[in-house]
Amino acid sequence: MRSDVIQTLLVANRGEIACRIFRTCRDLGITTVAVYSDADDGALHVREADLAVRLPGAAPADTYLRGDLVVAAALAAGADAVHPGYGFLSENAAFAASVQDAGLVWVGPPVKAIELMASKTRAKELMAGAGVPLLAPVDPATAAEDDLPLLLKAAAGGGGRGMRIVRELGALPGELLAAAAEAASAFGDGEVFAEPYVERGRHVEVQVMADEHDTVWALGTRDCSLQRRHQKVIEEAPAPGLDDALRTRLRDAATAAARAVGYRGAGTVEFLVSADGRPYFLEMNTRLQVEHPVTEAVFGLDLVALQLRVAEGGPLGATPPSPSGHAVEARLYAEDPARDWQPQTGALLALDLPDAPGLRLDTGYTGGDTIGVHYDPMLAKVIAHAPTRAEAVRLLARALERARIHGPVTNRELLVRSLRHPDFAAARLDTGFYDRHLAALTAPAAGRDPARAALAGALAAAVTATSGGPAPTRFGAWRNVPSGPQLKRYRSEPDGAEHEVAYRTPRTGAPEPHDAPGVRVLAVTPDRVTLELDGVARHFTVTADGDRVFVDTDAASYTFTALPRFTDPATHTEPGSLLAPMPGTVVRLAEGLAAGVPVEAGQPLIWLEAMKMEHRILAPASGLLTALHAAPGHQVEVGALLAVVQEDPAAIPVPEETA
């Protein structure tokens, strides 16, 4: 029997997954090696590794996607094995072969299995022969109205890139071109195929683990239906609401898929389950999944440790452990869901999760790190495990609510509200969840009180300014003081609302609110304020960083920017200016776009790529493009002027009463 005992492991990845693999390696006594780009110099995964090798450059194409450099790094560091993590080169058969050709142990499936599953079109043909249920493909050239809606998908790669839903036949040619262009840019392969789009379908998958001794484990199910832009946001195990017959069919189909390709190691077989309970094979991911922790929690396993054991030639047990309880995972992204999921960048000042039994945090960041523009905007995964689904969901929502996350805008509030949504609580899940509920989930939430939070921030700042942070000043009644009120203005993020706070600073004692009925100050320090609000004492934790103020309460968090008392006219931009909403790269322009051409309101003009996502810049009104400063390949910073549209008054509808 083959036995390759791994002593030193290089992880061909970055961020959260590299840190997670290193954690298991430490437990097993394996030396760890990180690779890092210039943009990741000093990143958490570099700090946690025993050894690290630089890959010169910042863009993924120059660093983490350069298999030759990664193999050379492994040899230079004396590694005897390579783990690919997920993303980047994890499903690249040529890279897996080059690792083995260099005499290194590949912690992944056989090269042949990767090749067979690399193309979704070839994989579906293979699965049909293995008896796995499939959706019938549709030839776009002959598609008719009866075939709609269609889902266009990239044959290579995943993560939602190159994916489009087509509901009108006339839109099919343009969407095919756009999907192919995005697929070619993301994966170097522009092949796109079409299949029926299943309305209200659920994304259900089965984790498999196989060894070279003919053992295949099917480790239950996961539901990953809550997605944005075809990328998962919340996952859970086991998938709720499936009857025993469907669970058995999914496990059997996943096992058949793994055996059909001679699979070894960890993999995931993904299915679309229709509203009437019929499963259809989507794809097999020949790697570890982002959402693997929920399966680990339910089965009490370390899937990375099992990957290493299988790579060393060791056997799995005859049967997997029995599952226990329920686990839910939420992906915390640096993005603004209310603004088309725009990724956010900048300094992450704090990322702290409360400690509680059943909670787990997998992250590639700590407070003080910087979130850049080159990679996925995921900050962390928060996982909760409990005896029942309701308990796990409650634990996760509360943990996210109480977390201290200071820095760029995140999707934290969306996650909390999603977990508490009636449809999620009742397990009414499908991939259209955010299409239906996003507006409500990003609307101002009941119970939020930014005005009182801004007041707490102003009082804490006043104490800091006057006395450098004294011990708590406690008092129980208002005082008549001779000084007049002082004003502070704040802009809240991400909604941009402005709040004006009036307070008095007496010669002795703590500052007091001015004209704030129902508010009684109980204690003030530079970092903590206690207010009695309508008879209820509430605590506000205040953290200042320059002009930014972060205020955390027991049930909400607020971010403010302190504003000058008077607006600077230089901050105004020309009407119709199109500004870059984030740092990124201009990937393409609308056909024929140039200064002097007419544009229509809502027309996509410029495409930006940032943090593995593509964003469209739309014309704000119908009119004339008077200036164009963007060009394909240009790197732009947030706020950069891309173009100017001069509105055409003739294009503005005239009210009927004045027509």
Image: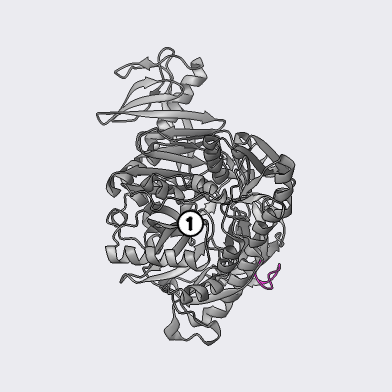
Q: Position of residue 545 (x, y in %)?
A: 55, 30
Q: Main secondary structure of the magenta part?
A: loop
* 417 sits left or right of 17 in the view: left
* SS state under label 1: strand
In front of the other: 314 or 119: 314
Q: Disc 1 marks which residue? A: 210
The magenta stretch spans which residues?
A: 589-597
* Direction from residue 446 to residue 94 in the image, left or right: right
Instruction: Confirm whether the magenta stretch covers residue 592.
Output: yes
- Residue closer to the observer: 604 or 146: 146
Residue 1, compared with residue 473, is above or below; it is below
Left or right: 115 in relation to 73: left
Decide which of 516, 197 is in the foreground and name it: 197
User: Image point 73% across, 45% down: which residue?
Assistant: 75
Horizontal and vertical percent position of residue 440: 36, 56
Which residue occupies 68% across, 70% down? 593
As drawn, the residue found furthest toward the front would be 1
Residue 54 visible here: yes
Residue 447 percent location from the top left of the image: 32, 42
Q: Is residue 214 left or right of residue 451?
A: right
Q: Is residue 281 above or below residue 305?
A: below
Q: Residues within 10 Å of mark 1 (few under 14, many from 20)?
A: many
Question: In the rendered image of this protein, does residue 442 appear above or below residue 501?
Answer: below
Circle 1: residue type: Ala
The colour mode here is one colour
